[in-house]
Amino acid sequence: MYDITSSCADDFINHEEILDTLAYADQNKENSTLIDSIIQKAKKRKGLSHREASVLLACPIPEKNEEIFRLAEQIKKDFYGNRIVMFAPLYLSNYCINGCTYCPYHAKNKHIARKQLSQEEIRKEVIALQDMGHKRLALEAGEDPVRNTMDYYLECIRTIYSIHHRNGAIRRVNINIAATTVDHYRLLKEAGIGTYILFQETYHKESYLSLHPTGPKHDYNYHTEAMDRAMQGGIDDVGLGVLFGLDKYRYEFAGLLMHAEHLEAAFGVGPHTISVPRLRRADDIDPDQFDNGIDDDTFAKIVACIRIAVPYTGMIISTRENQQSRERVLHLGISQISGGSRTSVGGYCEPEPEDEKSEQFDVSDTRTLDEVVRWLMEMDYIPSFCTACYREGRTGDRFMSLCKSGQIQNCCHPNALMTLKEYLTDYASPETAAIGNRLIEKEVLNVPNEKARKIVLENLRLIEQDNRRDFRF
Ligand code: SF4
Ligand code: SF4
C-alpha cells in the first residue's frame, strides 16, 4: 500500500500508486481546467505533487506546454538566476561485481580495461583537474567490496582534500558509490563529503530486477532505501537520478518525484539534486537494445516539469548530452553541469591507449572546461565554482529553509562572481578571461545589497591584485 513515510521501498515507491498516477494523468491530460489550476499552483513556487506534475508531463496541448516551459524558465531564473555551477566527475575504479545490463563496467565484460587509482595516481588526476580550474568533484566507482572498500574511499577523500597545487583546491567532494550501510554513510559524512549521489536507474521494480540480474545491486529494496540510510547516517544532501531510456519515462518521472516526496516527508528535507542522464552508447552496450529512449523534445519537457515540481532541488546534466541538447535545457531548469569530463579511470592525466579503454560511456560534449565556460558566458550565464554552502554548514534543512525563503540568492550571486574571478585569473585563456571580466563588471551591479556589493568589489580586487583566494558568503 502507498505510504509516503514508510521505510519500505515497496510502500513509498508503490507500483499501484504509480499506475494510478499514470492513468489519472492520461484521463486528464487534455483537461484544460485542471491543467490551468495545476499551473496556477506551480506559480506559487511551492512545488507540485507527483500526480499533478504527471498530468503536466502527459499534456499534449501546445499552448499549455508553452506555458509550462515559460514557467519552468521563470522559476529557474527566480531560484538560480543565470548561474550554472561547474563540476567534474573523477572515476576512482571501474572494478564491479554487478551485472547491470546497460553499463560497460558489468562484471561479465572481460575486454574492458579494469583499473583502480592508487593514491599517487589520484594526486596526479587531482592536480590535472585543479590545473583545469575545477573546485568540485563527483567521485565515481563500481561496486567491489574487496577492492573498492570504504577504507579506500575514505583515503581517497583525504588525499583529494589535501592537494593544493598552485592556487588550486578541491573544495567539495561529492560521491556516487553503491548503496551501503548507515555506519558507512556516517563515515563518509565525517570524511567531509558534500552530496551522496545514487541513481535509482529505474523505479520499475520488475525491470530493475531484470536489468540488474546479478550482484548486490540486484536487491531493489536495499538500493531504493539507500537514501534513507544515508540520512540516518547524517548525510543530509542526497542526489537522486534515473537513467532515462531503461523504462517508460512517465513511470520513472512519477517514481522520482515520489522518492523526493518520501525524503521530505520522512526526514524533513528533499533531495539536494536530481540528475537526468539518458542512456548512451558504450563499450559492450548497444542502446538500441533498450527501446525506451526519449527524444530531445520529451527530454526538454521532463526537465521543465521537474523544475516546476521541485523548485528547490538543483538539477544536473553531464557530458552524456551534446552541446546542443545541453543548451536547450539549461534555461529550463539545469543548475549544474560538468565540463572537460573524462569518464575513464585515470583519464585526466593522459589519454588512454586504444586497447586499454576504461570509460563508462561515450562523452558527447568533448569541449575543454575553458570552452564550456566561454560558451556559457557568451549566452550570458555565469559559470560558478562556488562550494560555499557545505563549507559554511549550510546543508540539509538549513540549506532548504534558506532556499525556500529566497535568501540563498544573496550568497550564490556574489560567490559565483568571486569564484569565476578566481577561475579567470588562474586558468582561463585570454579570450575567455576578457569575456568573463566584462561579464563580472556587469553582474556585480546586480548584487542588490550595497554593503555586500562593496565587499565583492574589494574581494575581486584582492583576487586579481593580491593573489588572495577563497572568499565566500
Ligand atoms: Fe557497476 Fe554501477 Fe556499472 Fe552497475 S552501473 S555495472 S553498479 S559501475
Ligand atoms: Fe550552491 Fe550555496 Fe554556492 Fe549558492 S552559495 S552556489 S547554493 S554552494
Image (tube, rainbow, N blue to C red):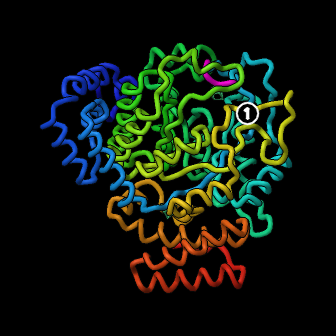
What x and y, as percent, mark residue 342?
72, 42
Q: Is residue 183 above or below residue 72?
A: above
- Residue 451 vs residue 324, the one in the foreground: 324
Amino acid identity at mark 1: Glu
The total of numbered circles placed on residues is 1
Q: Main secondary structure of the magenta part?
A: loop
Which residue matches tag 1? 359
Instruction: Determine crowd level at label 1: few under 14, some 14-19, many 20+ residues with C-alpha closer than 10 A.
Output: many
Across and down, in percent, residue 103 comes to 64, 24
Q: Is residue 368 above or below residue 469?
A: above
Tag 1's secondary structure? loop
Give the residue at x 50% y 19%.
208
Residue drawn at x 48%, y 66% is 412
Q: Nearer the viewer, residue 282 or 455?
A: 282
In the picture, which quadrant includes the N terminus? top left
Query: Which stretch appears magenta?
Result: 101-105
Looking at the picture, tell me which residue is in the foreground, 30 or 75.
Answer: 30
Q: Find the residue positioned furthest to the left.
A: 33
